[in-house]
């Protein structure tokens, strides 16, 4: 048996008996430790340091447990000032969050529906959506009216005179709303033209600074983004078709312009659907990242008290991304309704054209109006809360 002795035998240690024995067993090849001869120090009320150590002893802290065991957590090493700062920060974060919530509730209560519709109808786009709702609501009423009068109990029966007059007035009002909406979107090609001219001016400035040859305006038009070109051509074609309905252009030219406008609308709707899908994938990726952070914090034991700022920011960011994803899905549904509507005109489909276009047009009007309404409501709430 061999023994290993400590080089220093201080107070409370045996000089010859304080050792650890390692006993070999020849038959089994195993080792056995013997530590029964160790004597604990007599003075257990304070922490004993090795005098040979180069580090000075630290001030011992009182045990947090009643049975004498020590707990070494973050609260042991935090000073009193750090605890006060953390507590103050948590109180300020709670107060700011409660104030923001109270401001949002107060702003939501002060914004009335009449105020939102007033702001919505100030713009040409808002009036277009309102007239579209009226137009396709009347179309839907006429659609159900024709479906009811075509049923066997009412087929061939004599209808009252006021019903025929009402149907005629609604048909005339639908045509009037359609023409009014076309007039509201006149000169809709000015925004893409402004964008193209701004790009041409920027390119001219760059080439001028480099002392190169200035590119012609046609080159800028041909190299413009496809959505901008589609919007520009669609606006010109819509204006030509509107001028034909107003009698400023011939009927044949108006029909050709309307045909071109339908094709541009069809292509731009497909492009917008692709952009919508890409945008939603980005939003979902960001949403998964925020959810991953929240899940990691919850699994690691972090709470809103241990990390109040990060948790609240992540929660607000997640709510914002979820709201944005909701309206992206509503926009995609609206684009699908537009695609169904314009496909009947582009491909000249005849089967159930009136019924399908009426339902798709009304659904598109409701979705676009709801999105515009929410945008104006959020703008009013932001103005009140500030």
Image (tube, helix red, strand yellow):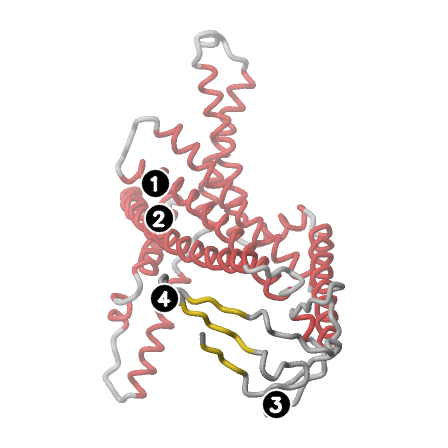
User: Considering depth in this image, is 33 or 261 the residue closer to the camera?
Assistant: 33
Point out which mark residue 150 bears: none
Work out how far the residue at label 3 is from the one at label 1, CA to CA, in angstroms: 83 Å
Q: Is residue 377 visible?
A: yes
Point out which mark residue 342 bears: 1
Residue at image point 25% right, 77% down? 215
Foreground mark, 4 or 3, reads 4
Question: Residue 117: x percent and y percent?
Answer: 62, 48
Residue at image point 47% right, 45% down? 330
User: In this rendering, would 97 be left or right of 273?
Assistant: right
Q: Does 12 appear above or below 322? A: below
Sequence order check, earlier mark of 3 and 1: 3
Work out how far the residue at label 2 is from the one at label 4, CA to CA, in angstroms: 88 Å
Disc 1 crowd, CA 10 A, few/some/many (<14, 14-19, 20+): many
Sequence order check, earlier mark of 4 and 3: 4
Q: Are dots 2 and 1 in contact, CB under 8 Å?
A: yes
Q: Are dots 3 and 1 in contact, CB under 8 Å?
A: no
Residue indicated by mark 4: 26
Residue at image point 58% right, 82% down? 16
| Image quadrant where one finds the C terminus | bottom right
User: Considering depth in this image, is 141 or 277 the residue closer to the camera?
Assistant: 277
Disc 4 crowd, CA 10 A, few/some/many (<14, 14-19, 20+): few
Foreground mark, 2 or 1, reads 2
Disc 3 crowd, CA 10 A, few/some/many (<14, 14-19, 20+): few
Work out how far the residue at label 2 is from the one at label 1, CA to CA, in angstroms: 9 Å
Residue indicated by mark 2: 269
Secondary structure under tag 3 reads loop
Foreground mark, 2 or 3, reads 3
Question: Residue 191: x percent and y percent?
Answer: 42, 62
Secondary structure under tag 2 reads helix
């Amino acid at each position: 048996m061999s023994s290993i002795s400590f080089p220093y035998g201080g107070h409370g240690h045996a000089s010859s008996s304080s050792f650890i024995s390692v006993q070999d067993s020849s038959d089994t090849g195993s080792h056995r430790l013997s530590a029964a001869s160790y004597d604990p120090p007599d003075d257990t009320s304070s922490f004993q340091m090795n005098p040979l150590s180069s580090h000075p002893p630290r001030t011992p802290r009182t045990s947090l447990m009643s049975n004498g065991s020590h707990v070494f957590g973050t609260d042991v090493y935090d000073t009193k000032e750090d605890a006060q700062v953390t507590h103050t920060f948590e109180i300020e974060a709670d107060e700011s969050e409660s104030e923001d919530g109270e401001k949002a509730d107060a702003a939501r209560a002060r914004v009335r529906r009449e105020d939102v519709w007033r702001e919505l109808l100030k713009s040409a786009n808002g009036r277009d959506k309102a007239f579209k709702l009226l137009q396709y609501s009347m179309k839907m009423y006429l659609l159900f009216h024709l479906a009811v009068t075509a049923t066997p109990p009412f087929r061939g029966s004599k209808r009252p005179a006021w019903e025929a007059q009402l149907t005629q007035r609604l048909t005339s009002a639908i045509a009037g709303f359609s023409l009014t909406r076309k007039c509201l979107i006149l000169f809709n090609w000015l925004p893409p033209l402004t964008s193209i001219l701004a790009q041409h001016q920027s390119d001219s400035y760059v080439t001028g600074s480099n002392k190169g040859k200035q590119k012609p305006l046609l080159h800028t038009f041909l190299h413009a983004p496809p959505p901008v070109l589609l919007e520009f051509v669609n606006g010109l074609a819509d204006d030509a078709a509107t001028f034909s309905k107003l009698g400023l252009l011939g009927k044949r030219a108006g029909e050709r312009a309307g045909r071109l406008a339908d094709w541009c609308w069809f292509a731009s709707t497909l492009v917008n659907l692709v952009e919508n899908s890409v945008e939603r994938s980005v939003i979902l990726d960001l949403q998964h990242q925020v959810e991953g952070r929240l899940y990691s914090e919850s699994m690691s034991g972090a709470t809103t008290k241990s990390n109040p700022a990060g948790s609240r920011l992540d929660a607000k960011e997640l709510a914002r991304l979820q709201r944005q994803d909701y309206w992206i899905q509503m926009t995609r549904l609206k684009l699908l309704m537009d695609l169904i509507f314009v496909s009947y005109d582009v491909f000249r489909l005849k089967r159930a054209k009136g019924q399908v276009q009426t339902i798709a047009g009304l659904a598109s009007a409701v979705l676009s109006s709801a999105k515009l309404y929410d945008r104006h409501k959020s703008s009013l709430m932001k103005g009140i809360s500030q």
